[in-house]
Image: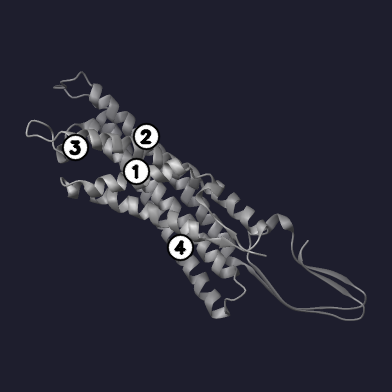
Amino acid sequence: MDPFSITAGVIGITSAATTSIVQLRSLIDSLSEAKDEVADITTSLTNIERPLAALERLSISDGATLNAFKEDMCKVGVAEAVNSCGDACKRFQKDLTKWTKHSSATKLSLRDRFSVGVWNKEKIRTFRTQLQWCETTLHFAVTSTQLMIQLRSEKASEADRESVRNQLQTLETRIKEHIDLTKHQQDEAQERKRELEEEPEDEEDGGAGRLLAIQEVEKQSRLLEAEQVSSGTVFSQVQSKRSGQDIRNIITSANSRTYVGMPASVVGKINQRISEVRTDGGSTAFVGIF
């Protein structure tokens, strides 16, 4: 059977979202001012495009495994992370276009736009948090899928499989470290919110900018919470699949009937290898999916 090719659309990622991500990076690449201010944004966008491209190159050997893959991606929330990131990129592109359209000494520079006003600073921070959620969710989900495909390959040697299992274990560690990082970032966001809730005596706009900044910090906390859930789901998936099963030296006899394999409901969810099954004395062995 020919392998099934994967596309972003298969797991619910819209073309509008991927287009917005690409267009924003192209706009930033064309900017001549404040390159340092957007360098980390450019890096994040590139890191998002890379696993999206890798996703398009993936192929899965059978329909059951493909369905399990789609189920895993849905549980992780990959489409939600990418599609909401695409929406955020579209809004940010409009802001950048507006800020850089008429450049003059009387207007704020892009650098100033990123740093003047508490609301502006938190709004930019929200966008960066949105990018982080998309970037890490895509990276962890696609990387774990690539490794699992390698682990299940019939062409892989035992040494290859051991190498992949080690890579999966390393990925587990990296995911756990990232979850700890997002918890720390969430604590920092809560601290900023507490500081913003303290009303200063010399507030010029009646607190309007400060209240908008508080709303941005609350958005950041929700994004970080979503990121923790996504990363935690990938972590659980990697843990369950890395262990796997290696079944060998099965001998049946005395007219017995034996089932060796797995039920259809868990295909794609565990890694299983079966070898050296022998039947004697009129016995029957059913090997595969049952």
Circle 4 SS class: helix
CA separation, marks 1 and 4?
Answer: 22 Å
Q: Residue type at mark 2? A: Lys
Q: Which residue is mark 2?
A: 219
Circles 2 and 3 in contact, beta carbons < 8 Å? no
Say if residue 221 shows up in the picture: yes
Q: Position of residue 229 (x, y in %)?
A: 48, 46
Sort mark 3 into few (<14), some (14-19) or many (20+) by Cα contacts within 10 Å: some
Q: Which residue is mark 4?
A: 171
* Foreground: disc 3 or disc 1: 3
Horizontally, is 50 left or right of 146 in the view? left
- Count of marks overlaid on the render: 4
Q: Residue type at mark 4? A: Leu
Q: Which mark is residue 100?
A: 3
For image coordinates 73% across by 57% down, the residue present is 264
Look at the image and name its color scheme.
Answer: one colour
Instruction: State which tag comes first along the sequence, 3 or 1.
Output: 3
Horizontally, is 122 left or right of 152 in the view? left
CA separation, marks 2 and 3?
Answer: 26 Å
| Foreground residue among 141 and 100 | 100
Q: Position of residue 185 (x, y in %)?
A: 33, 45
Q: Residue type at mark 3? A: Thr
Q: Quadrant of the N terminus?
A: bottom right
Q: Is residue 256 above or below residue 134?
A: below
| Foreground residue among 275 and 221 | 275
Sort mark 1 into few (<14), some (14-19) or many (20+) by Cα contacts within 10 Å: many
CA separation, marks 2 and 1?
Answer: 9 Å
Instruction: State which tag comes first along the sequence, 4 or 3.
Output: 3
Instruction: State which tag comes first along the sequence, 1 or 4.
Output: 1
